[in-house]
Amino acid sequence: PYQVPKHYTKADVTPENFLALLRGDEELEKKGKKVVKSGPNDRIFVYLDDHGGNEVVYFLDSVLHAKDLNDNLKAMHKDNKYKELVFYLAACYAAVAFAIMWLNDTDSHDLNKESRGDIENQHAQQYGDLTIAKEHVYVEELNSLLNGRKLMDKQIEEYVNELPGIDANIALNGKLELNNRDCYRKLVDTFNDNCYTFGRNTYGIQKQHIFVNICEQIRDSSDADIAVNRLIQHCNKNVMKTNNII
């Protein structure tokens, strides 16, 4: 069977390389990497499938921000890199929807008695060998996962309560609209680099609204810097960067 060549794998899969290959970066090409060599008469189709959040796409260890992607596409247009470009972005929680539903269900059930086939609120159809539904949940592994998520919740709540001039209830439970993008970008990148890597700890994606709510209560750049520095200090003190809470 035909094997699709993989030009970028593992550590090479970064937002920087992704944007560079789209615009046909010569320096990247000199390193032996494939890039898009296009001109004003070309049609380009891009398909990106990954975890996503509020104006971000999470690569394994780093974050692609919407502004950087848009700026890159605008630069390609200005440089006549394409005649037409279709960008298909599939970034949501679909890949972990079952896991999230499963974990939510275990909060109110006995893991020692429950099997995979007992998980409530499932609407997916079953095909093939259905005997796997009789297998018992791996109790220790699942409890470890749940405890890790509770730990992240606790650490984030403690951080929010340490911030001066911030209504903690609004920060933790509000649904404010994102406008302060500079502050939001700083907090998202700081959390990813110093606390929990979103691409490896996707439960953290559900917490990004907290950063929106914090930033929308901040009006001064110096206050944003305080929030960033407090986050670094809090994570350096309380978080093991190697933790995986997927």
Image (cartoon, helix red, strand yellow):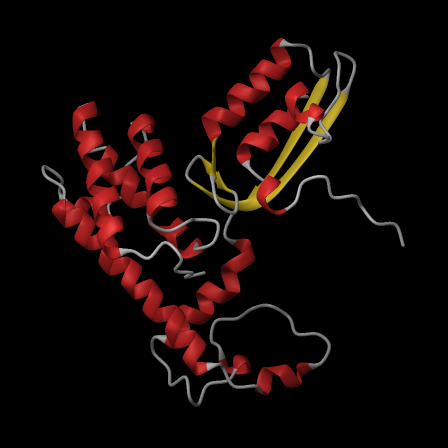
- Quadrant of res 11: top right
Nearest the camera: 162 or 218?
162
Question: Residue 92: percent from the left, percent from the top?
Answer: 51, 48
The answer to whether residue 168 shows anywhere in this view is yes
Q: Is residue 136 above or below residue 215?
A: below
Nearest the camera: 235 or 175?
235
- Quadrant of res 47: top right
Question: Residue 43: percent from the left, percent from the top?
Answer: 76, 22
In the image, taking residue 5 as reference, residue 184 lies left or right, namely: left
Question: Residue 35: percent from the left, percent from the top?
Answer: 71, 27
Q: Is residue 202 above or below residue 180?
A: below
Q: Is residue 52 above or below residue 123?
A: above
Labels in figure, total: 0
- Quadrant of res 171: top left
In the image, taking residue 223 as reference, residue 8 lies left or right, namely: right
Quadrant location of the C terminus in the rendered image: bottom left
The outermost residue toward the front is 31
Nearest the camera: 11 or 245?
11
The outermost residue toward the bottom is 113
In the image, taking residue 151 as reference, residue 26 lies left or right, namely: right
Q: Residue at x 38, y 52 (%)?
A: 204
Q: Residue at x 43, y 82 (%)?
A: 139
Quadrant location of the N terminus in the rendered image: bottom right
The answer to whether residue 23 shows anywhere in this view is no
The outermost residue toward the left is 165
Q: Is residue 214 above or below residue 29?
A: below
